[in-house]
């Protein structure tokens, strides 16, 4: 099995693989970044059959598994993320709310399955969940947490119950995702077992000075970045001023109708950007949908779903966009860039940002989706 050298940890973490009717990973170095319960010590049952995972994520130094010759896109989530840190125990949650964003994306709210709603579950912005569902509980699906940690541990006077949020893309060939796209009535109030994992996190570890934070999201790659942005906004709301600039570049396909309200998390991103203030900016790049032209130049409505002005480009993100987002060359040593999207897009953007004059390679953090 190929080992991943995490960009975020900035330290190679050795693992030993044991096999005795089950497979598990044993940690044998000082895992100084995460609490002990995030050690990847949970045993896995052997899985003989595989299924396609369309929403798998992998974070690495860029030298990990790549799609191509000899690469199978049907490796289960648990196998693909075996070298990633994860909890060594599970938590029980209840599906309390389901919202259909569009024909292919559903938002789930999961509440702790305890009488008072309390939980010992914690996570870092950017992490994902192993989600165990029928009919194959030994084959968990991997889905990103999109809510901030504060939503799971609200203040005592909050009217909102503690919850985790997931955004799940429809995928009939992915059993866990397919199970979660049943009719809502079959899912509401049902229980799931979950476990936290992943090393693509904010704030980056080890901590470092940040002058500017750049988020680059492609499609469903927006999910971990949504949690990170929401976390920063929650800190601002709590009076903890964040002394850095934020640039959020989001490239996504728009429905043929051109309805911006159907774009995953767009309205929330705008709201969080507004909360953070003038130091934060959003750029939206649409790659499909209806066009209209004025004076030979393709334009989009400049108002987002919340009615505020929105910078929209009808094209893909290019090199100039990335370099502009990174800011002045003289200040790039304190710029941290998070990139998440499909492998080809992510690879291209990683190369551009890493090679940008003044950028520190350790400050380019990424995760890939299949």
Image (cartoon, helix red, strand yellow):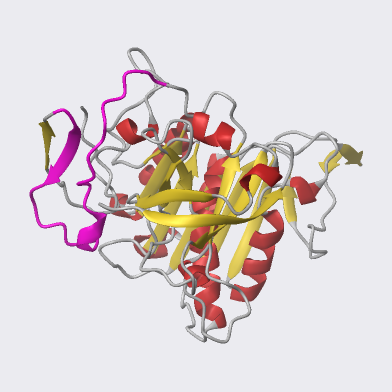
- In the picture shown, does residue 308 fall above or below 167? below
Considering the image in quadrants, where does the N terminus appear?
A: top left
- In the picture shown, does residue 235 fall above or below 302? below
- The residue sitting at 70% across, 46% down in the picture is 185
Magenta stretch: includes residue 35: yes
Residue 175 visible to the viewer: yes
Image quadrant where residue 233 sits:
bottom right
Image coordinates of residue 121 in percent, x first then y, are 38, 64
Image coordinates of residue 147 in percent, x first then y, are 53, 61
Give left or right: position of 347 versus 146: left
Image coordinates of residue 296 in percent, x first then y, are 88, 37
Residue 277 visible to the viewer: no
Give left or right: position of 301 versus 277: right
Image quadrant where residue 270 sits:
bottom right
Q: Which residues are magenta?
A: 21-50
Image coordinates of residue 25 in percent, x first then y, are 17, 40
- The residue sitting at 57% across, 35% down in the picture is 179
Give left or right: position of 34 versus 163: left
**Dominant SS type (magenta):** loop
- 133 or 121, which lies in front? 133
Q: Residue pushed farthest front? A: 115
- The residue sitting at 74% across, 33% down in the picture is 288
- 267 or 142, which lies in front? 142
- In the picture shown, does residue 342 fall above or below 312? above
Magenta stretch: includes residue 353: no
- 56 or 159, which lies in front? 159
């Amino acid at each position: 099995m190929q080992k991943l050298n995490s960009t975020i940890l900035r330290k190679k973490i050795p693992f030993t693989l044991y096999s005795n009717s089950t497979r598990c990973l044993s940690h044998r170095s000082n895992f100084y970044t995460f609490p002990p319960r995030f050690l990847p010590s949970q045993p896995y049952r052997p899985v003989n059959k595989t299924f396609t995972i369309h929403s798998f994520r992998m974070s690495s130094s860029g030298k990990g598994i790549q799609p191509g010759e000899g690469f199978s896109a049907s490796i289960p989530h648990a196998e693909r993320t075996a070298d990633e840190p994860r909890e060594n125990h599970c938590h029980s949650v209840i599906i309390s709310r389901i919202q259909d964003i569009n024909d292919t994306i559903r938002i789930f709210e999961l509440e702790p399955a305890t009488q008072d709603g309390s939980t010992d579950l914690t996570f870092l912005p950017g992490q994902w969940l192993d989600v165990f569902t029928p009919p194959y509980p030994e084959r968990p699906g991997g889905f990103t947490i999109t809510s901030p940690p504060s939503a799971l541990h609200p203040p005592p006077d909050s009217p909102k119950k503690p919850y985790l949020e997931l955004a799940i893309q429809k995928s009939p060939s992915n059993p866990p995702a397919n199970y979660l796209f049943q009719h809502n009535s079959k899912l509401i109030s049902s229980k799931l077992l979950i476990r936290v994992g992943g090393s693509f996190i904010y704030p980056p570890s080890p901590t470092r000075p940040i002058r500017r934070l750049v988020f680059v999201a492609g499609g469903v790659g927006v999910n971990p970045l949504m949690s990170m942005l929401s976390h920063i906004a929650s800190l601002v709301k709590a009076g903890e001023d964040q002394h850095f600039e934020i640039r959020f570049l989001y490239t996504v396909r728009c429905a043929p109708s051109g309805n911006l309200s159907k774009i995953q998390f767009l309205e929330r991103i705008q709201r969080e950007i507004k909360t953070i203030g003038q130091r934060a900016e959003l750029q939206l790049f649409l790659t499909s949908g209806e066009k209209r032209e004025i004076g030979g130049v393709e334009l989009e409505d400049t108002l987002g779903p919340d009615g505020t002005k929105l910078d929209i480009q009808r094209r893909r993100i290019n090199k100039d966009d990335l370099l502009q987002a990174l800011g002045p060359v003289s200040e790039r040593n304190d710029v941290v860039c998070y990139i998440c999207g499909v492998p080809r897009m992510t690879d291209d953007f990683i190369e551009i940002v890493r090679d940008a004059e003044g950028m520190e390679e350790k400050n380019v953090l990424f995760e890939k989706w299949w």
